[in-house]
Image (spheres, coloured by chain):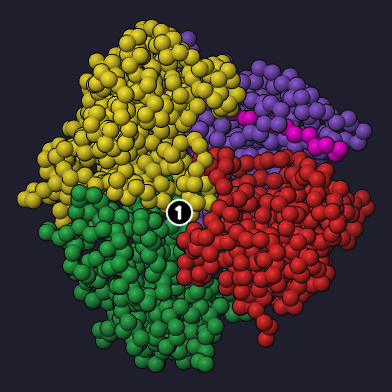
Chain colours: A green, B yellow, C purple, D red
Amino acid sequence: MHDMIEAGIIGGAGYTGLELLRLLLMHPQVRISVVTSRRYKGKRVSDVNPHLERFTELEYEDIDTREIADRSDVVFLAVPHGSAMDYVPELLNAGARVIDLSADYRLDRREYERIYKRRHKDTEHRNAVYGLTELHPEVADAALVANPGCYPTGAILAVAPIVRSGMAKRVVFDAKSGISGAGADPSEKSHFPNLAENIIPYELTAHRHVAEMRKELPQVKVCFTPHVIPSIRGILTTAHIFLAEGEERMTEQEIEELYRQFYDGKRFIRLRKGKDIPSLGAVRGTNFCDIGFEVEEDSDRIVIISAIDNLVKGGSGQAIQNMNVMFGLDEWQGLWHPGLVP
Amino acid sequence: MHDMIEAGIIGGAGYTGLELLRLLLMHPQVRISVVTSRRYKGKRVSDVNPHLERFTELEYEDIDTREIADRSDVVFLAVPHGSAMDYVPELLNAGARVIDLSADYRLDRREYERIYKRRHKDTEHRNAVYGLTELHPEVADAALVANPGCYPTGAILAVAPIVRSGMAKRVVFDAKSGISGAGADPSEKSHFPNLAENIIPYELTAHRHVAEMRKELPQVKVCFTPHVIPSIRGILTTAHIFLAEGEERMTEQEIEELYRQFYDGKRFIRLRKGKDIPSLGAVRGTNFCDIGFEVEEDSDRIVIISAIDNLVKGGSGQAIQNMNVMFGLDEWQGLWHPGLVP
Amino acid sequence: MHDMIEAGIIGGAGYTGLELLRLLLMHPQVRISVVTSRRYKGKRVSDVNPHLERFTELEYEDIDTREIADRSDVVFLAVPHGSAMDYVPELLNAGARVIDLSADYRLDRREYERIYKRRHKDTEHRNAVYGLTELHPEVADAALVANPGCYPTGAILAVAPIVRSGMAKRVVFDAKSGISGAGADPSEKSHFPNLAENIIPYELTAHRHVAEMRKELPQVKVCFTPHVIPSIRGILTTAHIFLAEGEERMTEQEIEELYRQFYDGKRFIRLRKGKDIPSLGAVRGTNFCDIGFEVEEDSDRIVIISAIDNLVKGGSGQAIQNMNVMFGLDEWQGLWHPGLVP
Amino acid sequence: MHDMIEAGIIGGAGYTGLELLRLLLMHPQVRISVVTSRRYKGKRVSDVNPHLERFTELEYEDIDTREIADRSDVVFLAVPHGSAMDYVPELLNAGARVIDLSADYRLDRREYERIYKRRHKDTEHRNAVYGLTELHPEVADAALVANPGCYPTGAILAVAPIVRSGMAKRVVFDAKSGISGAGADPSEKSHFPNLAENIIPYELTAHRHVAEMRKELPQVKVCFTPHVIPSIRGILTTAHIFLAEGEERMTEQEIEELYRQFYDGKRFIRLRKGKDIPSLGAVRGTNFCDIGFEVEEDSDRIVIISAIDNLVKGGSGQAIQNMNVMFGLDEWQGLWHPGLVP
């Protein structure tokens, strides 16, 4: 039996932090060593978040990065883009392993600075492993994992087997996300009368997450348009894949077989059979990525649908999956339960 | 001043029929001559539909087609695909003009039979005018108008100016519809626990409406994938347009100008400026089609967003717009009011 | 034929102001003389609110109260509680009639100061008529109308016939409101993830609106608990009425008859028959108040359900209804259209 | 360590059955011995319910009641009212313990026949223990447990401490339920366009569940009105409590203390402090009942709010809680996880 992993959470009051708490508090191999929040410093976590009442006596703290590292085997960074790089060097230097849920270490430095329009402060040019767990087994040995964006997770997993086979030339990702991806702070977009009875497309051609997709899918032209739907959780990605010139059309059964081999042994990838279509309900609250297929007749298009929970597989769940792999646990530990249906 | 137009409605208890009633009862130039329903024969329309209480004393009838024609200058067919063609010949022969909201006369005969998988019963091969009002001024003289499908309305209007200019080679329509498009009868898809907190893609590559889009947009390859969103009304269409080889990229301003000229004088088409994005709220309950643009940098893609109310511009409102044109009224008569915001 | 009424709107960017715009722009007897907004001064109303594009060329202004009065026959105050009383005296002195949609003149001075916890600044102790149009025909001659709160409108209309008959001793109003009642600014309560899949009770025993209810229903003990539901518009009020000792139970038919007489000639009150229950859909976007009844067997309880649109009959629509009465128009002018169903 | 409990589920395809599956499949002390469904006989449970893929290889069966009993230590009946009594006698005679989630054994025979308008077929007049676990510790020894209705669970737990203290004379329960309580089959009420942007009151004075409330709360007059809200899960109960003549008003702190003592050691009852109000989110997917209080000033009214998940504490979760108690496990086994927030 393993010793308990001591896990710290920096930024424990946003949705990402809350989801880490919800999952880690039930993880049989983890003890939360510290959870920070400037706003709620000194308050009981369960007073601020009544759904955690009876699950923890933790209080939010606001302490020195060094002390966080000292208390922790692994530290989750659930802070905004641009803030994570303030913590990473010191945490690593103090010997903690780090899982960064922000965008700060997902791209190479130049690309990051171009897209996020800020200088990268980490002068030692640390390398992170991109934590799309199914595609990057090297997270096992990583000191620093850059946890993927929510949209890239659903998008890349949806098409990797086809794209990496070299058959495709272009993918158009038309993604639909629950509003929790926009965070816990009220905004115009999250204002109920604006979102209910609506669907809000935004950053139609230039969402920052497209850079992660392109990095992981260099074989194809990638286009991406995100939308917010009137739902709390979930990302449904509609991937329109166009075959390269001269490629033969496959049947749904052949595609299913290709995917089955590609994702063999990956417990969080579930393939729908025939023309069955994934649903956000089946993955609600879980770390699964459900994938379905349809091939257009007399056409060069294949449509792939993937469904994930943006806060779990698209965020905190995948971070924990990475932690499991980093610490030699089964990847599904603390993450294994069915979706909340209905 | 015009005489009142005597308008009959066949199939007045479904959502399409109800929407015709809601709008025609307030139309200053129309008197409803008859409204039929087998299920509700003999019942007061306002007893079945409490929102119409105080607006009409009409009763649902179930009478002979010939009598409907005799009482009416124009007859709206709000019946399922496959049923409309049972009425059209007799109505036309009796001298009524007909606006068919079903799919029965939208395609040429062979295409219809292939796609709708039924024989067309109209032995005289009548021709209908496709009632996308902005693109088919010839509805003015039509005896029979085939009112467009809801998805084709939002899709075709979104891209016609670019596609007809010859600049594009392919369009991927990724459409998101409110559930009212599926009708008034409860179903698995409309069951609240299935649709809430979800978005349901369906007929991923082979929805029947794609045939209308291809007929109206012969210049490009057309792909189409529809989704149902947890909203009552509205269709938001995300059109991913790919430029033909060698075409120069336009700016958003140039596209806006192209559209402004193309839709000059069309009061129901509203163009958003710059990168402003249309919203379903702004068209809720109305006959407008709002359109916005974004050009992807360093790419051959343009994204166009259109927003319509599926039951109004995508159905009964456009039918009335066609009626207005057929009878020499201003096209906006009885259809001119702002969207229900919030 | 009347001359056009020149109507000014102070505070034209919140939901109340927007709803006044939506309705007054279509009113056949009204011209909007001025609409103010500090935030949007100088901007076209339709640039800020795309659903009004094509309906107005007005710009938001920020001008002197005196000038507003000079330009207007009537001024609508759509500003927060506590601000309206800054405008009322000058508007009245300059000869404009005023319809105040805030709470500032709904209660007598002492009650107002106790409940709203601020001093009333109007030193002349002006009297307003309480603008619950169906119960206060004296609005016809009023210079100043205090438009009722949204909750009191649905609550008082639901029970007035029974309460004023003296049969009841107590009413418990359990009200459920769409979130638009909380305004256009994002807040914790209006944050989609907080409200979706939830219902939020608040101010369980001490909502300020109860004072209006008690003033209009002095014959009974009034209790009130409001909730916000995951809907944009509408207030459904469940009124639990308890009969006074010794009162005989009535049948639903007798109650319906009592209501029919009480509301005779009131076009915006619609009574449901037998045990039919009102629905928010049937009143969506309209000025109607639909009312239904059920009598509990072997009990002293009657349950009355009323449904209104909080922004129309519960706000801007009733304000226009009052304007119509004040200026000798039919009370339904500019307000007569069926609910948006579905 | 206990042996695994062999648990059978009769009626495993409705929402109640699905929720039993979702929870029991993760229960560390339970093995599901059989799950029946006539409709899906022979199909893999996870083919019918994709969210259970990877969690079970079970197939739906349709077998003899006797065989179900032989294979099981305990049998859950998740069948409609009127059907459960067809199974209970044989199951008990064969030695299985039974937890009936229908209404068939909740009331005494005469009351049952009056309210459910059918004859009770169980000729041996078996007695069940009413399975409101916190109030009926005698479930520990029961052969037959009648699991409470969803509404009575939220209502009775909300007021039991006050009502049983003798202080109150009347309670008005105004309850708001997610639509999943109406089951997995599409209906008018669950049709998205009917429920979205609405709240549907029904059976205003005569819902059958009131009989359970009255049986458990004989000290007071009980009134009950249910509503369906546009949410999937959850019941929020607003309990308006009226004190008996001469009773002294308590403060919120005193009430909280009364509740704290009454529910001492009950892990699934969580009390909110001061005027904090429970939320459906905090109990989503869980077996908790969260309770909050507010005392009206200068009045005889206390308002108590309770929040439960109708399918868990209001159904299958409480059934499992009862099973735990019946088999000597900790009552929270297999039911201990935080709510899905956001």
**B292, above or below D28, in the image:** above
**A152, above or below B255, in the image:** below
Q: Which residue is mark 1?
A: B198
Kindly tell me whether residue A288 is visible in this rendering: yes
**B288, above or below D1, in the image:** above
Q: Tell me which residue sits at (35%, 64%) in the image.
A: A154
Toward the viewer: C120 or D97? D97
Work out which quarter of the rendered image holds the C terminus of chain A and state it: bottom right
The answer to whether C332 appears left or right of B98 in the picture is right
* Residue C212 position by quadrant: top right
Q: Tell me which residue sits at (70%, 72%) in the image.
A: D73
* Residue A177 position by quadrant: bottom left
Circle 1: residue type = Asn
Please provide percent x and percent y for residue A89: 34, 86
For label 1, count other residues whose C-alpha is less than 10 Å away and answer few (under 14), some (14-19) or many (20+).
many
Toward the viewer: C115 or A233? A233
Q: What is the tally of numbered marks visible in this picture?
A: 1
Dot 1: element: loop
Kindly tell me whether residue C48 is visible in this rendering: no
Q: Is residue A9 magenta?
A: no
Q: Tell me which residue sits at (11%, 40%) in the image.
A: B166
Report in which chain the residue with disc 1 lies: B
Q: Is residue C292 magenta?
A: yes
The answer to whether A214 appears left or right of C272 in the picture is left
The answer to whether D249 appears left or right of D15 in the picture is right
**A168, above or below A132, in the image:** above
Please provide percent x and percent y for residue B52: 55, 24
Please provide percent x and percent y for residue A266: 38, 75
Toward the viewer: D77 or A292? D77
Q: Tell me which residue sits at (31%, 43%) in the image.
A: B207
Please provide percent x and percent y for residue C148: 63, 34
Magenta residue span: C288-299
